[in-house]
Amino acid sequence: MSEQEFVLHTKIREYRARLDIKQSELAEKIGVRRETIVRLEKGLYNPSLKLAMDIAKFFGTTVEELFEFEE
């Protein structure tokens, strides 16, 4: 069985824009570095389940709404 590649798409930038907050502000609120938010928004980092849930909770949405994996 071969390992499949998944591409992560996020709506973090869209949700940040709705609240008019900077990457650094979001990072501080959820306890990560700004670089983590940058990498998440660019699809260069797959978050842990806890981090995904923390971000979704902050925005008042679900992990499924905020993150989408595509084969």
Image (cartoon, rainbow, N blue to C red):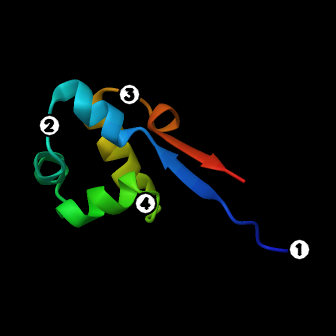
- SS of the residue under disc 2: loop
How far apart in space, not on screen, are marks 2 and 3 (Cα)? 16 Å
- SS of the residue under disc 3: loop
| Vertical order, 9 against 37 (above or below) | above
The amino acid pointed to by label 3 is Thr
Mark 2 / mark 4, whichever is N-terminal: 2
Measuring from the top left, give residue 46's x and y in whole percent.
Answer: 47, 61
Residue shown at the point (65%, 59%) measured from the top left: 6
- SS of the residue under disc 1: loop
* For discs 2 and 4, the disc positioned in front in the rendered view: 2
How far apart in space, not on screen, are marks 2 and 4 (Cα)? 22 Å
Contact check, label 2 and label 1, Cβ < 8 Å:
no
Mark 3 / mark 4, whichever is N-terminal: 4
Contact check, label 4 and label 1, Cβ < 8 Å:
no
Measuring from the top left, give residue 22's x and y in whole percent.
Answer: 14, 44
* Residue wearing tag 1: 1
Residue, far bottom:
2
Q: Quadrant of residue 38?
A: bottom left
| Vertical order, 52 against 60 (above or below) | below
* Residue wearing tag 3: 61
Residue density around tag 3, few if under 14, some if 14–19, many if 20 or more, within 10 Å = few
How far apart in space, not on screen, are marks 3 and 4 (Cα)? 17 Å
* Residue wearing tag 4: 48
Residue shown at the point (31%, 26%) measured from the top left: 60
* Left or right: 58, with 21 as reference point: right
Measuring from the top left, give residue 23's x and y in whole percent.
Answer: 18, 49
Mark 1 / mark 3, whichever is N-terminal: 1
* Residue wearing tag 2: 21
The amino acid pointed to by label 4 is Ser
